[in-house]
Amino acid sequence: MSTEGLSIPGISIAGSGPSAADRVRRRGLSAFGSLPRPAVVMFAIEAAAVILAVLDVWLVIPEKAQPYSIYLSGAACLAVVFRRKFPFLAVLVAVPGFLAGWAQLASMITLGMLATRRQLHWQTWVGAALVWTCRFVQWPLEDFVQLSWREHILDGIYGVLVAGMPIAIGMLIGARTEVANKLAELATSRDRERRFHADAVRAEERARLAREMHDVVSHQITLIAMQAGALQAQTTDERSLETAQVIRGLSKRTLEELRSLVSVLRAGSEDDGPRPGINELDRLIRTSDVPVHLTVEHLPDALPNQVSAAAYRTVQECLTNVHKHAPGATATIRIQGEHGALKIEVRNERARRTGESLPSGGHGLTGLAERARLLGGSFETSGTEDGGFRVRARYPLSL
């Protein structure tokens, strides 16, 4: 959603800027172009693991090494590449290269990944046993049989270290990931609790506003309607009778809208309930006591309810402002539907006569700007060269 070009005195709503996701995405780009940093780090880790495993084999290969030992060691280095997707299979492929070759580091790396993914699963214990066996048993077996008992004990101790260290590191990484997930769940739960509390506060405030509107505004409007009815019953002058009828009709419609708003406030519903729409503009213009030139172009057959209500409220507020601030001026309204949006322009001339100063808090235009922002449209106001005023609003048709 965005509010473009908003220019209201005393109001400052910025236009559409980069979202948080866009900012994070830009921060995540590195010197490798469009490749995000996590992918670069992952690639670097994978490359380092493979290079270390290859160097561990290549630097210790004797000159008269058996071909099968070299092949098994190479397969163990290759197992490092797919250890993330198939950790247990990678351990099984790397173990022969450790037993009959020199791929000790490759076996430890694959075992560490297995422990990270499986934690204390039976596959982790099987992989640890195989790695310990490869470190304890020497190849060929004739050399292993000739070792003394002291050498067997030392090889067993080193085997525990070789198999235990990757498991310890892997379990530590897995525990850290689990803690991070728990913290994320806790943060989500805390945010949800905050939302529930905010909803409860809003519901209480809505109920308070509903009471105030009903007790104060409804009472005053009812008195106006009653006074207009009394005037209508007592007067014999046709002009006074017509004025009383207009006042009574306006009071009744205002009471109906007020009761609808009070019901919505008490219910706390996201839907605003039944609202006047663009089809009721003719009646609004007839009762506005403002000279109006209305032009409607390319209006879609069906408008979203929110857009239709926003268009009605925009014209209503503009005509109210013309009546208050530019009495006697003519208002020109142009409504145009094109390019997937409904555009509304209301322009009025300078005041033709001096009128009674009516109270104004400046909240009408602010409310229209907020409505446009919530609907993903734009709202702007400006003065005209002839001393008048202009309001432009744009509401997207696809919500």
Image (cartoon, helix red, strand yellow):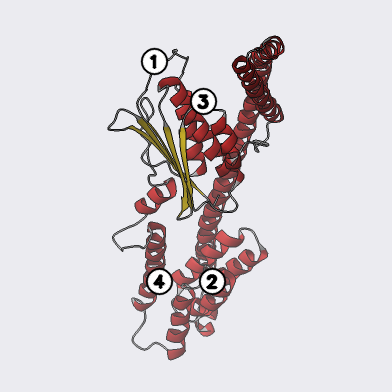
Q: At 56% from the left edge and 71% from the top edge, which residue is drawn?
A: 86
Q: Position of residue 171 (x, y in %)?
A: 56, 55
Spatial CA span between label 4 and label 1: 86 Å
Foreground tag (1 vs 2): 1
Report if residue 70 is visible in the image: yes
Foreground tag (2 vs 4): 4
Check disc 1 and give the amino acid type.
Thr
Foreground tag (2 vs 3): 3
Whichever of callouts 2 and 4 sits on the residue coming sooner in the sequence is: 4
Check disc 4 and give the amino acid type.
Val
Q: SS for tag 2?
A: helix
Whichever of callouts 1 and 2 sits on the residue coming sooner in the sequence is: 2
Q: Position of residue 31 (x, y in %)?
A: 28, 60
Q: Residue beneath label 2, please? A: 136
Check disc 2 and give the amino acid type.
Phe
Relative to 166, say whether 380 is above or below: above
Give left or right: position of 6 versus 336: left
Q: Residue beneath label 1, please? A: 354
Give left or right: position of 58 versus 214: left
Q: Residue beneath label 3, please? A: 289
Q: How many marks?
A: 4
Residue toward you, 246 or 19 = 246
Q: Are marks 3 and 1 in contact (CB under 8 Å)?
A: no
Q: Are marks 1 and 2 in contact (CB under 8 Å)?
A: no
Characterize the local packing of mark 3: few (<14), some (14-19) or many (20 or more) Cα atoms within 10 angstroms.
some
Whichever of callouts 3 and 1 sits on the residue coming sooner in the sequence is: 3
Residue 282: quadrant of the picture:
top right
Q: SS for tag 4?
A: helix
Check disc 3 and give the amino acid type.
Asp
Q: Residue beneath label 4, please? A: 50
* View extreme (front): residue: 237
Whichever of callouts 2 and 3 sits on the residue coming sooner in the sequence is: 2
